[in-house]
Image: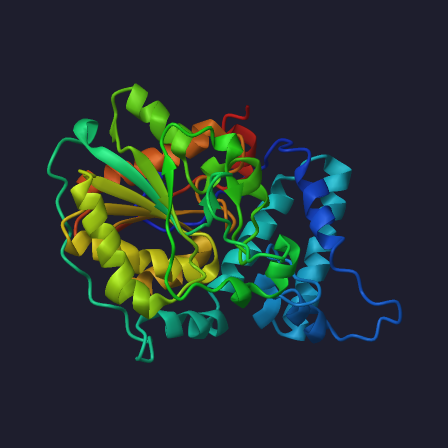
Amino acid sequence: MSGSSKSGSGASGQDRPAVDEGFADRLVGSAQHMELPSDASITLREFADSLYHGERANNAFKFLRHATEDEFDQFLQQLLEQVAAAADTGDSGPLADFFQQAQARGYNSSAEAKVIQSAVAPGTSGEQPLEPIPLAPLRVPLSQARIALFTSAALRTPEQPSFVPPQMSYEELVQSPLKAYERHPSLREIPMTVKTDSLLVEHPAYDIAAASADPNVVLPIDRLRELAADGVVGLSENSYSYSGNSNIPRLIEQTAPDWAEMLRERGVDAVVLTPGCPVCHVSVCHVARAFEMQGIPTAMVFTEAWESAARLVRPPRIVLTRFPLGRPFGPPSRPAIQRQVLLEALQMLESATPSEWMAWHQTPWSSALRDGGKI
């Protein structure tokens, strides 16, 4: 298993043995929701647009919305070639990496950057990176620090209020995510004693399939409890979840500072934050900055697709992984890789400096699927 690095070098292209036999089936299953109409009277451009919260809404592939017709045509041809190769060899590793890398390129494109800029600094062009803020020090040893997890990925317990509006199905919400837009971001407190397989995931703007199968891919409660049992860290009483599909100016001005004050009153020593959807990546950066300004050190875990957003919003400390959106800690039911990524984020609480605030976890997606400690 690969470790983290301060460099951003690419993943190894070496031959890989067969991995995750069901990956190709799941990818094809996603594609089954993207049927053309019977008369096929649609352009590639219209087809790509419809993946973005349209009639063929598909959060796994909506990164294609900014692709030109030629780029979309090339993606489809390469995808079919990868599927055929996986069928011949029984090795879905190259297909998994192809998908992850295509997604990272799509979300780091200049067109996508312009969309994200509007959320970076409300009231400005968002083209210039935010000024870095001083790093709040970890005031106790990591082994004694009470750590909280904080995510914008919209998880909740069955007893808590839903993020989905009444009389609306989740599938309908994916096509119309603004119907769940929160002017005042609402928080769900999730006890550290929760059974993670009971958690519900309701964010309409990222592919929640992995998080629904294993919430630890976005909120690694089980992994944090394991590290606490091994004496690596201490635990807070709760983890916290909200939906990044919410008002960012109000989050910056009021909500995030209020959350920071709440955590201070509860004796939380440090926080690990994770995003869900594209705009969530900007949202949790602002939350982290608010926490740091009130003396609570933070570390974040992003996927590679949002490196450009991280460089614009400048979170205090961040680990980037080479995994698809919605899976910052790795694949479902792969506890070893999830634990390693979380440990690297926790170590950033002690090792990060103003000039070394970004680290890379180097494990490729295919290797995480194969070697991540499958249950």
From the viewer's perspective, tell me whether residue 70 is left or right of residue 165.
right
From the viewer's perspective, tell me whether residue 142 is left or right of residue 305.
left
The residue positioned 46% from the left and 28% from the top of the image is: 195
From the viewer's perspective, tell me whether residue 158 is left or right of residue 128.
right
The image position of residue 362, as x and y in percent, is 41, 42
The image position of residue 86, as x and y in percent, is 72, 41
Q: How is the image coloured?
A: rainbow
The image position of residue 87, as x and y in percent, is 76, 40
Farthest residue toward the right? 39
**Quarter holding residue 184:** bottom left
Farthest residue toward the top? 230
- Quarter of the image with the N terminus is top left
The image position of residue 271, as x and y in percent, is 26, 43
Q: Is residue 316 visible?
A: no
The residue positioned 14% from the left and 31% from the top of the image is: 141
Q: Is residue 81 visible?
A: yes
- Quarter of the image with the C terminus is top right
Q: Note whether 27 is above or below 177 in the view shown.
A: above
In the image, 51 versus 107, the foreground residue is 51
In the image, 211 versus 154, the foreground residue is 154
The residue positioned 53% from the left and 41% from the top of the image is: 200
**What is the tally of numbered marks visible in this picture?**
0
The residue positioned 34% from the left and 39% from the top of the image is: 239
Q: Note whether 273 is above or below 232 in the view shown.
A: below
Q: Note whether 330 is above or below 205 in the view shown.
A: above
